[in-house]
Structures are given as C-alpha cells and as structure tokens.
Amino acid sequence: MLIEAQGISVAIGGGIVLDDESLRCKTGIMTALVGASGSGKTTLLHCLGLLLPVDKGSILIDGNDVTRYSAAARRRFWRDHAAFVLQDYGIMDEESVAFNVTMQASFIGKRVSGNKERLKQSLEQTGLKNRGNELAGHLSGGEKQRLALSRAIYKDANILFVDEPTASLDATNRRMVIELLADFTARGRTVIVSTHDSEMIAACGAIHQIGSSNSSH
C-alpha cells in the first residue's frame, strides 16, 4: 500500500513539531524517517499510521484521503492493514509469548487460540522457536523486540510502522531485527521506520530527512 503525506504540519504544546512535511512510502520499499533527536521522527510515524491527527495537510493511502477518518474507520485500518512495533514493544509481560503473538485466547482455560501453523512459523522466523509457553516478561529487550515483530509477521499486515527498532539492542539482535524487517519488506509490504541507526538506515531503500520534504532512493 502506498502511504503519502502531503504538506502535513503538527503543533504540540504550542510548538511546531512538523512543518509542511511531504513524502511517499512505496510498497516493497523500506523507508527510513531520519533526523536529529527531537526533530519529529516519531510524530511523523504516528501521523502516517493514523495514531496522531495532523493540523494541516493530508495523509493518503493508495490515493485515498484518510486525514479525517472517523475513529471507527481508523480502527478498521489498524485491524485490517497495519501493524505497529513501537519503542515500548507493546508486550504484555504477564501473558505468554504465544498469546502476545496471536492476541487470541479461548475463554475456557485461557488457552491460546489462532492459527497454530502461522504462530509456529512467526516464532521460528524471529528466533523464538519453542518459547511460546514462556511468560513474555522473562524475555530480554532484544527478544521482546523480536516478539513484537513476530506479532506483525503473524498478522501479515500490509503496512508496518516501526519506531527506533534497534535502539539499545546488542549487535546480534540489531542484525536480526534489520534482517527481519528487510524480509518483511521483500514480501511486498510497506515498511516505515523511524531511526537514527546508520546500519538500519543503510538497509532502507528510501530515506526521508525530516525538514527536507523529500525522500532519497
């Protein structure tokens, strides 16, 4: 899916965070949102993912203006098309690894439900094979990041929004996360990454510098 921002501006607390930003994030290309700390990378990512409204400009998905989507329409977009990997991982520590992937459980006995084969494959791809029954709280930071990616792989979302995926990771986990994102992109998905990591940026096919209103390929 093609995600576009056309001249969007956002002010928070009286200060301008984004000023007339425009970019195109194409299918099958991983796009890096880059800029100095505090430049608005995460804000732009949240606007593109319809998590944050814009004050001016438009957000388009496959040419359709979604800027003023209703709350119900945004929920449908998140449910049917989008997956998010945010800085806090969005992991429920008190639940099992498997539940954190499928987000489904039976009412009786709280057994994890969902597509067992897809669950197995998503855990294998992220290096978490045979760890489905463990509590997510027992995982390291890098493993939680991979668990969040496992959830996105399981969902098979069209668009993946990722915020600083390699921050605070060791070299092994950093490489694994970058490879997972590249593989996800190669399957014809749209991947948008907010990052300051030069290794992550190098793996992206397009780079948008905050404040420049253009992307390089």
Image (cartoon, rainbow, N blue to C red):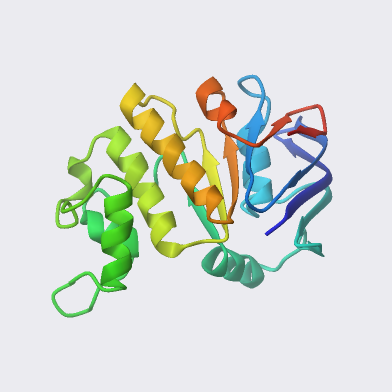
Q: Looking at the image, which residue is at 44% across and 63% down?
A: 155
Pinpoint residue 77: horizontal percent, then vertical percent.
61, 66
82 sits left or right of 18 in the view:
left
Pinpoint residue 22: horizontal percent, then vertical percent.
82, 41
Q: Nearer the viewer, residue 175 or 167?
A: 175
Q: Looking at the image, which residue is at 63% across and 24% down?
A: 38
Pinpoint residue 100: horizontal percent, then vertical percent.
30, 57
Q: Looking at the image, which residue is at 61% across and 20% down?
A: 37
Q: Quadrant of the C terminus?
A: top right
Q: Is residue 13 above or below residue 72?
A: above
Q: Nearer the viewer, residue 170 or 11?
A: 170
Q: Let me know if residue 82 appears in the view.
A: yes
Q: Let me know if residue 170 appears in the view.
A: no
Query: How many numbered marks appear?
Result: 0
Outermost residue toward the bottom in this view:
108
Pinpoint residue 179: horizontal percent, then vertical percent.
44, 38
> Quadrant of residue 202 in the image?
top right
Q: Nearer the viewer, residue 193 or 180?
A: 180
Q: Looking at the image, which residue is at 56% across and 63% down?
A: 78
13 sits left or right of 117 in the view:
right
Q: Quadrant of the N terminus?
A: bottom right
Q: Is residue 69 above or below residue 136?
A: below
168 sits left or right of 200 in the view:
left
